Image (tube, rainbow, N blue to C red):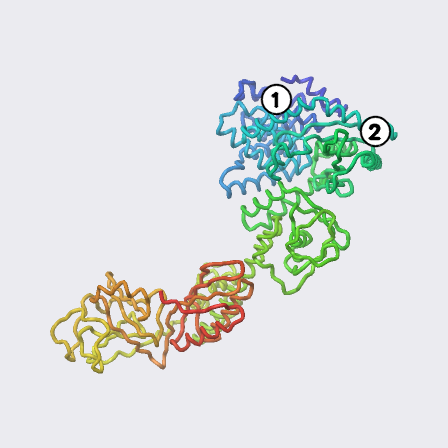
Amino acid sequence: MMRQYELVERVQRYKPDVNEALLNKAYVYAMQKHGKQKRASGDPYISHPLEVAAILTDMRLDESTIAVALLHDTIEDTTATRDEIDGLFGEDIGALVEGLTKIKKLDLVSKRAKQAENLRKLLLAISDDVRVLLVKLADRLHNMRTLDHVPPEKRARIAEETMDIYAPLAGRMGMQDMRDELEELAFRHINPEAHDTVTKRLSELSAKNRDLIRTIEQDFTALFTNNQLKATVTGRQKKPYSVFRKMQSKSLSFEQLSDIYGFRILVDDIASCYQALGVVHTRWSVVPGRFKDYISTPKQNDYRSIHTTIVGPSRQRIELQIRTYRMHEIAEYGVAAHALYKDNLKGGGDLLTRDSRAYSWLRHTIEQLSEGDNPEEFLEHTKLELFQDQVFCFTPKGRLIALPRGATPIDFAYAVHTDVGDTCVGCKINGRIMPLVTRLNNGDEVEIIRSGVQVPPPAWEEIVVTGKARAAIRRATRAAVRKQYAGLGFRIIERNFARANKQFTRELFKPVVHRVGHKDVEDAIAAVGRGELSSQDVLKAIYPEHIEDRTAITKAAADEGWFNLRSAAGVIFRVPGARRLNGASANGPSASGGEGEGTNEPLPIRGVDQNARVVFAPAGAVPGDRIVGIMNDDKEITIFPIQSPMLTRFDDQPERWIDIRWDIDEVRKVRFPVRILVNALNEPGSLAEMAEVIAGRDANIRTLSTVRVASDITELLMDIEVWDLKQLNQLLMQLKETACVSTAARVYE
């Protein structure tokens, strides 16, 4: 276990004017608070914060960050309080310790929605001060190194969380060495069989080529010396997880891997980088397509280096990384390499925002919190951003845009600006018109062709790879659908208000919109269009004094054997067994079969009284249809058109059939329900166009639902209200003639 003086000496090596008093006080305080606590391994608990502090001294971090590492578990696991730490060490350190305590409580591998929300909290915590992230990553690294002592079920959860969140986050912050070790340790616990297999194969290969790396290092060193170039050459064998990931992603066997060995060439300045590249390429053959210059176009995490692959001294493919010593320091330690203490800043945020592209990425990710409509979209966006490698493209004016590998011009357009993406209709790549599904490559110059009337098609969501583009397309699609429903709802409301001789305006509706359960006028109008809210409710909300004028139906003569039920406007019922109308027999057989058949007296109908309820079948019926009633067990009469296939279920139950005919008041007509099925093009504006045809035919949409959605066709089931069969047939004919409609037909089921 590291002693107090050893910790101070470690910091003094890179910061001679270290605040020894702060480190000593934090060391003693942590030692006292953790007391006799033990870790799962049996070691004293204080060994953990000391190891975390040691990891951070390797990153050359300031004494404030080291003190936070010593104290990071005190609030969570001891009697220490935030006020106590503020009093002893200052509010800055107290805030960092409290931030780490909150992060420790987050479960980042729980069910998806909770995981998304916890990831939000994690990124918000580290966005205030990046030192929270540095301490947390060091804490996680030491926990992973000692994971064998943790129970198996908890071990699997921690390893998965490390692989999914913390390792990619370290990579995004430019801390590649830490990412490699975190992935390696997590891989060993997540897939131990694969880890053991790859490790064994690498060990066999290393034994076989025992002197290969040293020989190649000597060949490179001699080459640079002969060309008067000062360079340090180091070789290494790839780690098991890196090998396994490449085998998985490219579907290769171990024997097919040709670049298991990599070499790093470190020089003094940028000019020497390109000089070394020229020397190497002059001496050995280059593998085409394997050259990347991250010095001229750095990665978003500040990584800068030249990558090339050659057929080296042993006639074997060798990966080379050429960089300066400063670039190597940033590649190894990422944001930590910016040496926060140099400017004597209280926190790391200001300097990092100015100097670190990696921290700028973090800030950009936090901005997505306000753009995502729900936590799951944010989780999807962030995981995409964490894992994807990048390609670099340019606008026609030379602006550099970094995108995930596999990105399309649509992703590029949204990366430039959301408005550019929403209005994109085409693109030029390197001066040539290309499809929007084209995958972009490094160095492509992309020009976006725009249209002022374009709305992004929903199908784009399946094409793009960036979270920002996907979220924007979903948002635009929802807005377009909402606009269609709002247009439909407004027409429905206007027509209902016109029938009531009332005026409707958004200004009148706004003060009373809460009465219909909505906060926004447009939301309420769209709800009417979707059938979730009745236009009659809107009328009552604005004009509470309005009384609905109900249709009155004149009763037919009793001696005909026909009568009216109060709950059935527009239809009358024939008493089974009463006097035959015009000598014709009734459709339904007699329910009573009683005496007096054929007389003028109406006979009682078994199970039917003036309180019986009358409803239409789900598919409805309209004047002009031949109709029949079926008596249900609960004394409810359902009216079916005679063509309904549902009537076959009652063929063996003649006592339930009731003869019905239409009895329409020509002065005060009422609409009747009917169901239609429409196949329409899956594109913005289709619904509004259909609604306009329906409204133009003086019909009314009661409900609308989507039955099936294909890439180009949407199947819509509509319950509408029409005056009669003639109007319905005319409406169906006009819908079929509409450009966006493929088929339109009545549904009888």
Q: Is residue 463 above or below residue 177?
A: below
**As shown in the figure, which amino acid type bears the numbered disc 1?**
Tyr
The residue that appears at 69% across and 24% down in the rendered structure is 209
* Residue bearing mark 2: 223
Examine the rendering and report whether any part of residue 609 can be seen.
yes
Tell me the quarter of the picture where residue 572 sits: bottom left
Q: Is residue 155 above or below residue 391?
A: above
Taking depth in this image into account, of 220 and 79 the one nearest to the observer is: 220
Regarding mark 1 in the picture, which secondary structure is present there? helix
Q: Quadrant of the N terminus?
A: top right
**As shown in the figure, which amino acid type bears the numbered disc 2?**
Leu
Q: Which mark is residue 592?
A: none
Tell me the quarter of the picture where residue 58 sits: top right
Q: Position of residue 404 (x, y in %)?
A: 65, 45
Residue 607 falls left or right of residue 273: left
Distance of mark 1 from mark 2, alpha carbons?
Answer: 55 Å
* Residue bearing mark 1: 29
Mark 2 surroundings: few (<14), some (14-19) or many (≥20) residues within 10 A = some
Q: Position of residue 59 (x, y in %)?
A: 70, 28
Residue 718 falls left or right of residue 6: left
Q: Is residue 368 above or below residue 133?
A: below
Q: Quadrant of the C terminus?
A: bottom left
Q: Position of residue 192 (x, y in %)?
A: 54, 28
The residue that appears at 85% across and 27% down in the rendered structure is 225
- Residue found at the very far left of the displayed protein: 595
- Residue found at the very far front of the displayed protein: 315
Taking depth in this image into account, of 659 and 566 the one nearest to the observer is: 659
Examine the rendering and report whether any part of residue 94 can be seen.
no
Q: Position of residue 518 (x, y in %)?
A: 48, 59
User: Which one is in front in this view, the residue at disc 1 or the one at disc 2?
Assistant: 2
Regarding mark 2 in the picture, which secondary structure is present there? helix
Q: Earlier in the sequence, mark 1 or mark 2?
A: 1
